Image: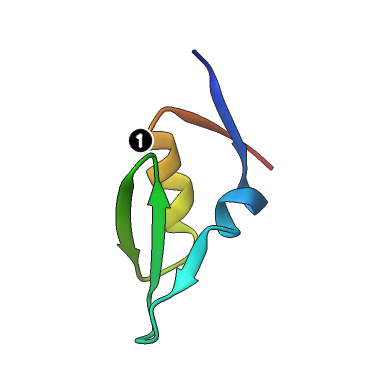
Amino acid sequence: MVKTATFEALLGDVVPDGQGGYHFALEGKTYHLLDKDEVRKIAEEHGYIIIY
Protein backbone atom coordinates (compact mmCIF):
# COMPACT_ATOMS: atom_id res chain seq x y z
CA MET A 1 0.00 0.00 0.00
CA VAL A 2 1.29 3.42 -0.94
CA LYS A 3 0.68 6.17 1.59
CA THR A 4 0.94 9.79 0.51
CA ALA A 5 0.41 13.09 2.29
CA THR A 6 0.96 16.71 1.46
CA PHE A 7 3.39 18.57 3.66
CA GLU A 8 0.71 21.21 4.24
CA ALA A 9 -1.77 18.59 5.49
CA LEU A 10 0.79 17.21 7.91
CA LEU A 11 1.52 20.70 9.23
CA GLY A 12 -2.22 21.13 9.80
CA ASP A 13 -2.00 18.43 12.47
CA VAL A 14 0.83 20.14 14.38
CA VAL A 15 -0.42 21.72 17.63
CA PRO A 16 1.60 24.10 19.82
CA ASP A 17 2.28 22.64 23.26
CA GLY A 18 2.40 26.03 25.00
CA GLN A 19 6.07 25.60 25.91
CA GLY A 20 7.73 26.44 22.61
CA GLY A 21 7.34 22.98 21.08
CA TYR A 22 4.62 21.09 19.27
CA HIS A 23 2.55 17.92 19.46
CA PHE A 24 1.96 15.84 16.35
CA ALA A 25 -0.06 12.63 16.05
CA LEU A 26 0.14 10.14 13.22
CA GLU A 27 -1.37 6.65 13.03
CA GLY A 28 -2.12 6.53 16.75
CA LYS A 29 1.31 7.68 17.90
CA THR A 30 1.95 11.10 19.42
CA TYR A 31 5.25 12.92 19.02
CA HIS A 32 6.74 15.97 20.73
CA LEU A 33 8.51 18.23 18.23
CA LEU A 34 10.85 21.15 18.66
CA ASP A 35 10.54 22.15 14.99
CA LYS A 36 7.54 21.76 12.67
CA ASP A 37 9.78 20.43 9.91
CA GLU A 38 10.25 17.21 11.90
CA VAL A 39 6.82 16.04 10.65
CA ARG A 40 8.41 15.15 7.30
CA LYS A 41 10.87 12.72 8.89
CA ILE A 42 8.20 11.15 11.09
CA ALA A 43 5.82 10.66 8.16
CA GLU A 44 8.59 9.10 6.10
CA GLU A 45 9.37 6.72 8.99
CA HIS A 46 5.71 5.65 8.81
CA GLY A 47 6.16 4.89 5.11
CA TYR A 48 4.56 8.03 3.67
CA ILE A 49 5.63 9.68 0.46
CA ILE A 50 5.49 13.43 1.02
CA ILE A 51 4.02 15.60 -1.72
CA TYR A 52 5.08 19.25 -1.77
Count the marks: 1
Q: In this view, does 43 lie above or below 16?
A: above
Task: Give the residue at x 42% y 27%.
Answer: 47
Task: Give the residue at x 49% y 13%.
Answer: 1
Classify the position of the C terminus by image quarter: top right
- In the rendered structure, the answer to whether residue 29 lies left or right of residue 10 reads left
Q: In this view, does 36 lie above or below 45?
A: below
Q: Residue extending furthest top?
A: 1
Q: Quadrant of residue 43?
A: top left
Residue 13, percent from left and from top: 53, 58
Task: Give the residue at x 60% y 59%.
Answer: 12
Residue 38, percent from left and from top: 42, 56
Residue 37, percent from left and from top: 49, 59
Q: Residue extending furthest front?
A: 28
**Mark 1 closeness class: few <14, some 14–19, many ≥20 residues within 10 Å:** few
Badge 1 amino acid: Glu
Q: Is residue 7 above or below residue 19?
A: above
The foreground one among 17 and 36 is 17
Element at badge 1? Answer: helix
Q: Residue extending furthest bottom?
A: 19
Q: Quadrant of residue 4?
A: top right
Q: Is residue 46 above or below residue 18?
A: above
- In the rendered structure, the answer to whether residue 9 lies left or right of residue 28 reads right
Q: Can you identify the residue that label 1 sits on?
A: 45
Snapshot colouring: rainbow
